[in-house]
Structure formats: structure tokens, C-alpha cells
Image: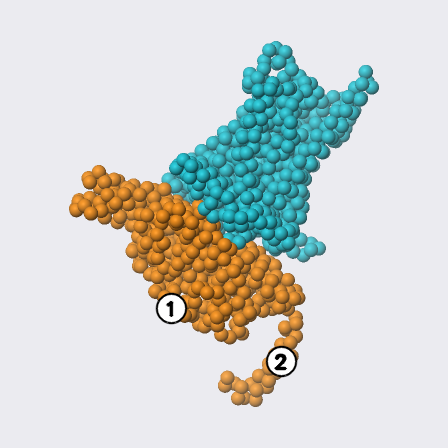
Amino acid sequence: MTYAKSRFGQLFAGAALAVAVIAAPFQASALEDKLVIVTSYPPDTTVTVSKAFEKKFPGVKVEVLNKSTSSGIKYLQSTAAKNTSDMFWASAPDAFEVLKGDGLLQKYDVKVMGIPEKVGAFPVNDPAGYYKGFAASGYGIMWNTRYMEAKKLPIPKTWNDLTKPIYFGHVGMSAPSRSGTTHLTVETILQGEGWDKGWALVKEMAGNFKTVTERSFGVPDGVNSGQFGLGIVIDFFAFSSKASGFPVDFVYPPVTTLVPANIAIVKNAPHPKAAAEFIEFLLSAEGQEVLLDPKIMRLPVNPATYAKAPKGFPNPFKDSSIGAAVKFDLKKSKSHYNVVNALFDVMVTYRLGDLQAATKAIQSAEAKLAGKPSGEAKKLIAEARALLGKVPVTEKQADDKEFNKIFTTKRKKASTEVKGRQAEVEREWDTAIKANYAKAKELAEKAISMM
Amino acid sequence: MKSLSQSHWGPGALAVCLSLFLVVFLLVPVAKVIYVAFQHPNTGALTLINFFDFFNNSLFRESFLNSVYVAGMAVLVSSLIAVPLAYFTTRFTFGGAVLIQTLGIVPLIMPPFVGAVAMLLLFGENGSVNLLLNDWFGFTVPFMKGLNGVVLVESIHYFPFILINLSAALLNIDRAMEESAQNLGASGTRLFCRIVFPLAMPGYVAGASLVFLKVFDDLGTPLLLNINNMLAPQAYLRITTIGIGDPMGYVISVILVAFSLFSLWVSFLALKGKDYATVQKGGGGLMKRDLRKWEKVGCYAVVILILVMVLSPHIGLALLSFGTVWSFSVLPDAFTIAHYENVFRTATQYISNTLLYAGLAALIDVAFGTAIAYVVWRTGLPGRQWLDYIAMGAVAIPGVVLGIGYLRTFIEFQVPIIDKPLATWWVIIVVALAIRRLPYALRACVAGLQQVSIMLEEAAENLGATKSRTVWRVVVPLMSGGILAGFVTSFATAAVELSATIMLVSQQSDAPLAFGIYEFMQSAAGRGPGAALGIVAVIIVGIATYVSHTVIESGERKRQAGAAVAAAAGA
């Protein structure tokens, strides 16, 4: 503050201080009477937190609008001209990136102290200051203990375990295009294992899928009710299900990442002061403790709060094995965000039947091969596996800016022109993928007939 | 059909108002969205290239065929459920006919996604039934696997459309027709197949075409069962995942609309050139017939079997609402009423909102449905058929598309006095519900009107009644069965609508029931309270339906009694 040395500067600083001193108590008592939050969280989370907030600030009535992350984004985009929402509150940082890119978020500087810079390998807050992390989330495998006992299935520890034939038809997951958290899971695997190996792993797991659910909550729901035994989910779904009494459990595989769940103030918010106070509350020791409520069960970002956590609750600030193996690169994720979504849908979601059939054939061929030195059949199976895991796009192409333009959702100006259409590209992929799966199945069956 | 009156002024003004409403709240918002289907994704120029992409993609072709298959099978299965229920309860002395009719409507008043949750718990691969089968006999039946699951859930959910419309039509048939047939020696199935069913054809076709259309563009059920390879889910997934700029979702919407209109046209053709009107309204001739003892036993067995099947989602939901934890077991681990306490403590607002919205929407629907039916079938206004087509077109507009269209169209329109954008005012939810459910009310009103002989109106006018008096005193009372059917269908289904409202609810205090259930169902601890809220919804709408049934029945009885007195006095 060099200018403070000048007389004018001192005067200015003094005046500013005076205004701040006068305004401070006034500000605190002059919170608006209402706060409108758009969120993807269930009432269990929102009601519990906003009750605690309302208790502390009795004059403010919190209105919660529950929408899925993607329709929440669409809602804010559609209503931006006459914005009535104050805050956006959801898990996936990418969703906030989208809103930030559209200029729909308001910058905010947090006053609360004691929140570290990073959780796992991920910065807690948006470096540009638009959205703030309030909890950490990791991704892993959840299972129904009754189901596992009834079907005599072993407990998996890693993503690779899920590719074993014993889990065929027992696993559920959502699609990255449907669920921000699932996108992060897939992206983590791709970054942790590399593009080609990562996709091969994802598709081998997907071969064991029973279903690809439409909502991210469809996965814990399916595991809880026993529709399928295992699910690939975000941690708090599993913790809160367990806390609600369901016979389920959860493990973090080594290749996972911890990502902050976020909150931000919407631009032109009608109740900005109450919104700011909500962020402060959520990050305070008091607010962080609410996250440990059995119905919420999210990892707080304040390390001190873990002292109050129940026994066995994971602490990423102590247990460095969680989310440390992969250094998640948000920039890289952003560079091929839509391509990954489209690829997963074309290869897995919409062709799950073909993928399952090919996987089944390969698995039975491998089972038959076990212990037999049949060189020719082995070669055929390896060939089938390679076909099954093949991705129609190289990493270089997926990261290519021009190629990504085909998948960008918006033409900003009428003059923008791009080559190729998404539907056209997907059609080409679909044709190739369908042929690959059919061929892989054929090869595996041929291998079986040779033994 | 020739017009009765020389002056077109009254109906003309009415038709203009109706068209204006439809243009503002249906055509403009949808056009705003569908326009995208004809835009080149790269240049923004008008083009058909997107349709070329659609038909070249094997996934889309497959989705199209799957949708047609599911919709067709659902009509078949729903007919198997609905026709016996409708025929037995309207044609024979049958204890508890009103109860059965009401129970038969109950499936409609549950959001399809809730029904699917319950059906999965009971009939899923690891649901109660299959767990038992596996324990006892060592095999399971894939009730809910793939497209079959969709057909099953949809049939159980939508068969009431056929039941309601067919029952209304059966009650409207002049029983003298049946009497004559019986006098000439027809009975049993022959009487049904040759006389009764053909005369009730308008009601059946109205119901069946609704089932076909609804199933064809239903979103919730396939999504919940994670079936993606159908048209509506494809449209929804494209719009919500790839985003508003991707044209394929809109192309699919256009194709949904086009195919739906095509099948409507086919159903028009099926009825064309035949006269279904009977001079006398049902109830005047033969009273309900008695069944022989063994016939009665058989009928009851069939009815009970059907009811158990169609009520299974409710049984599942009831178990869920009283159960603590239900996981991979035949029944919940223990029972509790805590979920209901939770609901009555926190969620009563959803209930009152729903009653308000659905009630208003259904009133708008029957008023407009009656008006449109009258304009289309009883006046000679040029282009009047278009009113019908456009109103029916709403059935083919996916709720999400309508919701997005409303947001885009009305966000700039500030409502005076309350000073809020129209798109975020709760009234817009009522309008959306009214538009979405207008086709149901309209089909029912048209079926009602088609069965009123035009001779009755001519007679009234010859006796000096004015046009409006004729409509009020003759036409509307005579088609009251159809109007009631329309009101009940609109009300009950609007009460559980989710796809459009999920886009339009702008504050918690405006949220209706289905939205509340959806919210609850998004968390592990919320399944019980969500189910409890669902049960509360079913009971409330069920009671409302039952009351309106009895009200109309007693009204009809009174009118008949009055008519009998008048006739006696005249004699």
C-alpha cells in the first residue's frame, strides 16, 4: 500500500475505515429477508443446512430450488435476463466453470479463516474467486452387503477388480453426460491410467454393468434396494445411505481424486448480503460441522472439524492415500469434456447390450482357456479384447480445439462456423463401435469353438 | 357436418379466443424450440441436414422402432386390462362397480417414475416376487427386463385412459340397441363384439389413441428403467446433456410430433364415415343385466386378478412408505409411521399447491375442451379442424420442451401488479398443466359430443331455444359424462405431472406434489417420506375422483327422475 503514505492516501484509507466501521454493524443487521438457492442437493442436505442457517439469522427465509445440476445450469441461463436466484450450490466444479464462462457468477472473497488451499491434489476454491469449495468428495465403489452374501461375491478393492468375470451383470453406474460426479470419475480414470488404457479399463468395467442409470442418484438407489450389488458412486451417497440404515459399504480405490463440492453467488443476485453470509456460515466451524449430520455425511474442508467426526470416517487431511495417486488436471478435463461425454454414451450407454454380449463371450472364452496352452485361441481372445477396448478417437484428437468445436453446445455468434456436425461424428463412431463389438464377440466365439 | 345456425358470429369469436390462447401458450413457445431442428448446427441457416443425420443413424432408427413397438404393445396390454373392467362394470349388476371404476383410475394418479420404483421393488430382477420364486423354485422371471418392463409399467399406468373413455361411451349407448339385438337372439360375446363394442368405438379409439400417444412420448418410465434406446429418452438426453444448441433433440421432438399427428389422423380415419350418435342417452332402455352365478364368479375372478395387478405399484409404494429399510428382501425389515409424520410436518404445502394447480388446469381443460369440440363438430367455420389438431398436438410435445419454451418466451414478459416475470409466476405452471392435459379433456369431450345426436339440438332450436341456451341446456348436460371423464383424467394426471413443472418451479413454496416426491426420492433417507407423500397424493386424488363420480351419478339420477316426472305429467 504505497499510496497510503501520501496524505491523500491516508485520508482515503481513514475515510474508508470510518465507513467500514459505521457500516459493519448496520450491514449485519440489514440482511435481506430472503435467500433463493438453486441446488442439486436433496432436501436432507439443504433443509438441514438452511435450518441451521435460519437459526443463526432468524430474519432470513431460505428458499431452496432443487434441480439436477444440468437443468440448474439451464435454468440460470434461461432466467439470467430477469435473475431471481441468489446462489448456485452443487458438486461438480465443471458446472461452475460453465456458469463462470457465461458470466453468470459473482466474485466473492471469503472472510472465514482456517480452510486450507488444497484438498487432495485439488485447489479448494476457484483460483479466479468465483466459486468456493465447502466440502470434499471422492469417488469409489459402494456395495450392498446382503446382495454380496446372497450371490457370494468378493469385495472389490480397485477399479481393476470390477473387470473380473465374477461381477458380470452386478455393477451399476451413471453416465458422465448425465451426472457431473460420474464425469469426474471417468475423467480421473482416464487421467490416472492414460487415455487408451483408461478407456479400455472403463469399457472392461462397463462390460460388467447391469445398467447405466439416468441420474447419479439412480446408482446408490439401485444398490440400496438391491437391484444391483455394486455401484460406482460419489462417497457421500454411500455414507448417507449407510447412516440411513441400508446394508451397504464403500471403498475408495487407489485411482481416485478428491474434488471440492462448491457454492457460488449468482450475478445480479437479488439478496447478495444474505448470500454472502450463507457462504461464510457454510465455511465456519459451525457450518462445517453440519456436514457431519448422518443424513449429509460429506467430507468437510476444514481439517479441524474432523475431530468431531464419527469413528471410521475418512479424513483426507490425515489419510494421504485418499485421492493422492492422481493429480487431477481441471484444464485437461475441460479440454475434452464434451468429447468424453459423447464417447461414453456412444460406446457404453447406447450400446450396452452389444458390449455385454461381447464381454460375456470373451469372459467365457477366457474361462475355457484357463490352463490350456492353446496359442491360437489365446491370440484370438487377445484380439477380441483389443477390439472391445478400442476408442475411435485418439487423445490428441480429443484435445484438439477445432475438433472440440463440433461438440461445443453454443454457437456464440451467427458468424461462427465449424466443420462437421456432432450427429455426423457420432454416427461414424457408432458404426465403428457396433462393428467392433460384433467382431470381438465373433472372435471370442471362434476361440471357444477351437478349444 | 353442416352448421345449425346461419350466424357464425358467436362461435367465430369463441374460435378466435381459443386459437389465440393456443398460439400464445403452445405454438409460439414450441416454435421457439423446434426452430432449432431446422437450423444448421454450424451455420445457423435453415436446412434439412439434421433430419438426414437422424435417419442415417442406426441408433435413432432403432429408437424409433422401439418406441413404436412399446406404444403398440402397451395399447394391446392396456386393452386387455381395460375392456373387461369397463364392460363388466357398466353392463351388469355388479357389486362395487363405482369402487372398481375408481380403483381403475387410481394408477393414473401416481407419477410414472414413482410407479416404476415400486414395480422394481416388487417385480425387478431382485424384487420381492423374484426373490420368492428363486427361494421356492430356483428360477426368476424377467418381468422388468428391457422393453418388456416399459410395456408393463406403461400399460398399468395408462390403461385408465381406455377404461374411462370406454366406460363413458358404454354408458352413453342407447340400450334400446342392445335390447333389440337381444330380442333378435344375440347374447354373450356375440352381443359384445357385434353391437356393444362397435357402438362404443369412439370412446375406445379416443382412449387407445391417447395411450398410444402418451406411451410413445413418455419419458419418466423408460428413464427410470434406464432404457435409452427409445425416441423420447433420446430427445431428452440430447437436450439435457449435449445442451440447448444440439439440434438432434429437437429433430426427435419434431419426429415425435409428426408421428403422433399421423397416428391421430389414422384414428380419425378409423371413425370417419360412421355414425355413432344415438338419439337416446343410456339409462333409458334396458337396465343392467344380471349375471348367472358361475359367470359372476368368473367375472369377479377376472376383475380381482386385474385389480391386484394394476394396484401392485400402490401396494409396493404403501410397503415402502411404512417400511424402514427395504433392501434385497421380500418385505421391508420393519414398519413405522415416521415417514408420514415427516410428510405431515414438512410437506403439506405440496398437497395444497397440487390441488390448486390441477383443479384450475382441469377446469380450463374441460371448458376449452367442450368449446373446441363444439366449434369443430357443430359449426361450419373454415379451418375449424385445425383447432382440434393444434390442441391435440400438445400431447406430442415433450414436457421438457414445453418447459424450456415457456422459460424462453415468457421470461421477458413482466406481469403487471405483482411485478414478476410471467415465467416465474405460479400461474404459468397452471397454464403448462392445462396445455399438457388439454388433449385428454378434448378427446373425452369430443367422444361425449359425438354421441349426442344433432337431432336433439335441431329439436331444441326448432322449439325456439337460442344457440347458447341450446348449448347450455341440451348439449352440455347430454355430454356431461364425457366432460366428467375429461375433468377426471386432466385433474388426476395434472396432479402428478413432473416433466414440464420441473423446469418451471421457481420457488419452493410454488412446488407441486410430484416435484416434492421427486425431491424426496433423490436421497437415501428420503425414499420412505417420498413414498408416503405418494400415498397421500393417491388417496387425495382418489377421493376427489370418487366424489366427482358420485356427484355426477346422483345428478344424473335426479335429472332422470325429473324427466320421468315430466313424462308422467305429460301423459
- Is residue A43 toward the left or the right of residue A356 in the image? right
**Above or below for A115 versus B57:** below
Q: Nearer the viewer, residue B395 or B543?
A: B543
The colour with which the image depicts chain A is: orange
Q: Residue at x 65, y 66 (%)?
A: A58
Q: Residue at x 60, y 49 (%)?
A: B337
Q: Residues within 10 Å of mark 1 (few under 14, many from 20)?
A: few
Mark whose residue sits in front, 2 or 1: 1
* Residue B104 at least partly seen: yes
The C terminus of chain B - image quarter: top right
Which element type, helix, strand or loop, lies under badge 1?
A: loop
Which numbered disc covers residue A21? Answer: 2
**Above or below for A138 versus B529:** below
**Who's cyan, chain-wise?**
B
Residue B18 on image: x %, y %: 65, 38
Residue type pointed to by label 2:
Val
* Residue at the spot of label 1: A320
* Residue B14 at least partly seen: no
Q: Nearer the viewer, residue B379 or B432?
A: B432
Which comes before the other along the chain, label 2 or label 1? 2
Q: Residues within 10 Å of mark 2 (few under 14, many from 20)?
A: few
- Is residue B45 toward the left or the right of residue A389 in the image? right
